[in-house]
Image (tube, rainbow, N blue to C red):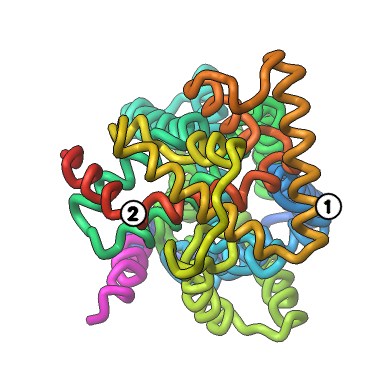
Amino acid sequence: MPRRALVPLLATLFGLALLWAAARHLDGAAVGRALAGARGWPWLPLGLASYAAGHRLRGLRLRRLLSHEVSLPAHTATNVVLVGYAVNNVLPARLGEVARAWFLMERSGLAIAQTLTITLVERLLDALVLLALFAATLGFVPASPLLAAALPIAGGLLAVTALAAALGAWAPGTVLGFASRAAIRMWPAGHDRVMRRMHAILAGLEPLRHARTVAAVLALSLLVWIFEAGLFLALLPAFGFAVVPVNALFVMTGTNLGLLLPSTPGFVGPFHFFCAAAMESLGAPRETAFGYAVLVHAAFFVPVTLYGVGVLAAHGLSVGRTLALSREAEPLTAGPGFAGSPPAPRVGATSDPPPTRFLLALAEAAVPIDRDRIEGEEARPLVREVASFVGGQLHQLPVRLRALFYAGLAVFRVATRLRFLHGFCDLPADVRRRWFEDWAYGRLPLARQLFRPVRSTALLAYYERPEVRAALERSAP
């Protein structure tokens, strides 16, 4: 069996096992009577409206996460979200996340590794908000011992994941240095490929550096799940249950936390298992609880699937073609250079002009010489080679772009003198590096775009030098 098929197979088996566990002791006739007696009007339309509003908020959240890189219309961002949900509903193992990342790449122009990272950031924030809401409901709703025991375990795993994401967002240089040493140690031939992927991943984590963005995204995530709880709340009276918001919130969070693991298409099985179990813990009869789970799942499944497949059809794509394209998209970032940068010639392939003093200082700030312990006589010619290569690549830009780039650098130099009362070249090396990173990784999109060609070409030249590879091999663990 191909390894690519193993994860979907195991995920499907997991989901089917939960479906069997949920349905094995049920009276089918009683479930049928519960569904036949459910009052769809006006509760089902109200629930669907609340659920649709939640998806619109998901689109706004994605738009905000991308706001530091691209300006994506809210309607397009919502369509990206719904395509992911639709593909998750027809394919196993959460393959919709891959399709969504490809569709986002196609709509935004970002690298596939970056769009995948953004998707994972959203899932991480969803999990944190769901866990917090679930914990809050436990003060009002009796939970099973299993759920209570699982809460600290899930919280610990999410905390570790959140810390890893925060490290990538706030210390990208440290992460790149570690990744470089590890790649040299374990996969020397793939070092450049690893570094390209790491740059794209860190670009996807970059929104987490901005407190306002994080606050806005968390607030939108909270609203997303409150509106999704509206679907669960609206269908409670359809089965004769009291309209108790905390009960709906408890069932919604318990169900969705159970769906975080890959499983069957549309989460058939896990959805019914966790939703029915939560309803039973509230005192609902087993068959009625399962009937409620069936109706909520249908409301969750049908409209989103139809809409998402319609979006794909409007773009001339099938679900299978979407996934095929998402696999083919990876080589787009496989050439020389980093995510989003054009291929660059190899160092030494052309005769580059002598670098200016400013370009030397800029190149030194862009590469991790201190972390790689390259000092003294070995460092100076290395910096000169890197700066010369960067200068040569910048000289190849079209005249208009080159003029705009140097105008941007002039603004940077003026800002440096206003900030430190000294020129950039006169600052201590550690201050220069921090100031460079404030611009290259900071909160201003124009500043990041200005320094992207310097950063990517400098790192490309740096890691191709034999003395750097030798230093990495010496310091590798």
Magenta-colored segment: predominant secondary structure:
helix
User: Does residue 192 sit above or below 432 in this rendering?
Assistant: below
Q: Can you say which quadrant of the picture contains the N terminus?
A: bottom left
69 left or right, relative to 389:
right
Residue 155 placement, left or right of 141: left
Q: Position of residue 76 (x, y in %)?
A: 78, 61
- In front: 136, or 426? 426
Q: Residue at x 40, y 50 (%)?
A: 462
Q: Which region is colored magenta? A: 1-16
Q: Which residue is mark 2?
A: 465
Q: Report if residue 390 is visible in the image.
A: yes
Circle 1 residue: 42
- Residue 123 horizontal side relative to residue 53, left or right: left
Q: Amino acid at mark 1?
A: Pro
Q: Secondary structure at mark 2?
A: loop
Front residue of 208/476: it is 476
